[in-house]
Image (cartoon, helix red, strand yellow):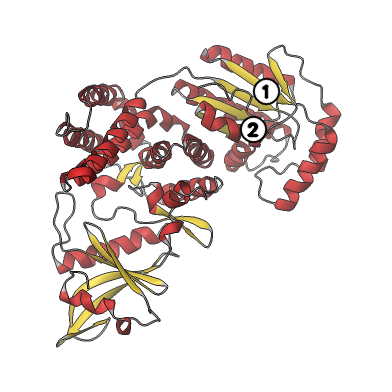
Amino acid sequence: MESVPNHLKPFFDPAIYPHPAEQIEMIQTHISWVFLAGEYAYKFKKPVNFSFLDFSSLEKRKYFCKRELELNRRISPAIYLGMHSICRQGESYQLDGDGEVVDYCLKMHRFSQSDLLNERLNNGNFDAAWMDALACDTAGFHHSSAANREIDHIALLQNHIALNLDAASRHIGTGLNRQTIQSLTQFARRELATLQPLLEARQSDGHIRHCHGDLHLKNITLIDGYPRLFDCIEFNDDFSTIDTMSDVAFLIMDCDAHGRPDLGMRFLSRYLEFSGDYSGLKLLPLYLIYRATVRGKVACLLADELEGEKRSLQLSEAADYFELALACTGREQSSLFAIGGLSGSGKSHLALLGCGVERAIMIRSDATRKRIAANHPDLELYGNQMHINTYNAMFAAAKTTIDAGFSVILDATFIHPDSRLHLKQLADSSAAPLHFFWLDIEETILREQIKKRQIAANDISDADLHVLDLQLEEYRKPAETWVQFLTSNSIWPRSHSR
């Protein structure tokens, strides 16, 4: 039997549980014990007191158990089921019984470790569409959380980055590169000063909220085939009351660390479609650096507890994270990509192929139209004025994105010459190279694809065969010399780049 306090030893016995629990397993972290029993898991907080959390007393563990339940039920009520007391009568213990309360625990829906998204990705069993669902849920979660205009989030960010780099500096020469840490220190100091007005504006505009705080692939699991966030930070608001863009940055960084920037850019693109928070992109590089240094610091702290080869492996992992942070300090030329074509031509599929290759943010006219529709309740969703509003909003988001240093992939029909002229003007005014791809697909294929899409009922586009017929009535093949025609959406035409 594992070494645990006396009141936890009965949890190795199926008799204590109010449900079948033939095989019981206990796992632990530096702050918790978790008993896996049947279809459920029981999570206990260790009576520890670190600089960033304090579970040392019974009352504090009760408080933080309750807080963890409340905060996580906002995002994963299917996982977080309830809170229980552990009671002692004489030498026996039971859940929610009579006698003295000696501890508290959370009851959770048990899930397989193999269903954690980091495990799914490592095993090559990952559905990229999960990122769309996560983006929708994260944007909704952020929207429902109250804004905080009191916390000094700038000072906290500055302090957290400094502590991360200080932890790294103690390992220079034993695994970490001095120049990397010095460059990161200088960059962070410079960017924090430069971005101070924007950081202040983010708070006054209501973007500092109680977020997840630890949003990476290992804290997302599949429940009935759907990705669910769990284990948000409950023990210290300094780490979770943050800019919503900082929360998003953690998952993007983690996808980069796993060698899948396409997943991160897909998540970011969809999140922005739901939230409309393109103005926050200027802060994203700083937040990506912060998140990478967080993981680097954690690896350094783990290395301090190890020896020999295990220590070396942890320091190697730390070095990888700090090098990833350094890579985020670079600036590349932003490009403007656009994909046009009739409904059913496969524009969105081609955009997905390009977002990782180009590290570009996708902006879809269909998603933009639906996001801004609430601002125009008197307009027909597919009427002429709504069409104009949609393209204006899409071009405005693209300009903000390019100005923030990111490439863009616009996904729209671009049937009307004026929309293509507006596109060219945007590229010229932004000094961004323009790459415009037109999917020139046969009409029979267009009709087949629209029918398939309607049967699947999983696409954001509402365009049906009637819409296609209306498009065909006014369609004229683009005559601009800067248009590149494609007959297939199966290969990104610039796969050789970057």
At numbered mark 2, what does the secondary structure look like: helix, strand or loop? Answer: helix
Question: Quick check: marks 2 and 1 in contact, CB under 8 Å?
Answer: yes
Q: Residue at x 34, y 45 (%)?
A: 209
Q: Residue at x 75, y 27 (%)?
A: 487
Image check: 63 left or right of 456? left
**From this viewpoint, which residue is outermost toward the front?**
309
In the rendered image, the quadrant that contains the N terminus is bottom left
Q: Is residue 361 visible?
A: no
Q: Quadrant of residue 343 in the image?
A: top right
Give the mark nearest the N terminus, 2 or 1. 2
Point out residue 269 in the picture as x, y percentages from the top left corner.
52, 36
Q: Residue at x 33, y 74 (%)?
A: 24
Q: Is residue 253 visible?
A: yes
Q: Specify the amino acid type for callout 1.
A: Phe
Q: Specify the amino acid type for callout 2.
A: Leu
Image check: 409 left or right of 10? right
Tag 2 residue: 350
Point out residue 346 in the picture as x, y percentages from the top left corner.
70, 35
Q: Residue 437 has which mark?
A: 1
Whether residue 486 is situated above or below residue 60 in the rendered picture: above
Point out residue 417 in the picture as x, y percentages from the top left corner.
73, 19
Q: CA distance from mark 2 to mark 1?
A: 10 Å
In-front residue for pair 82/112 = 112
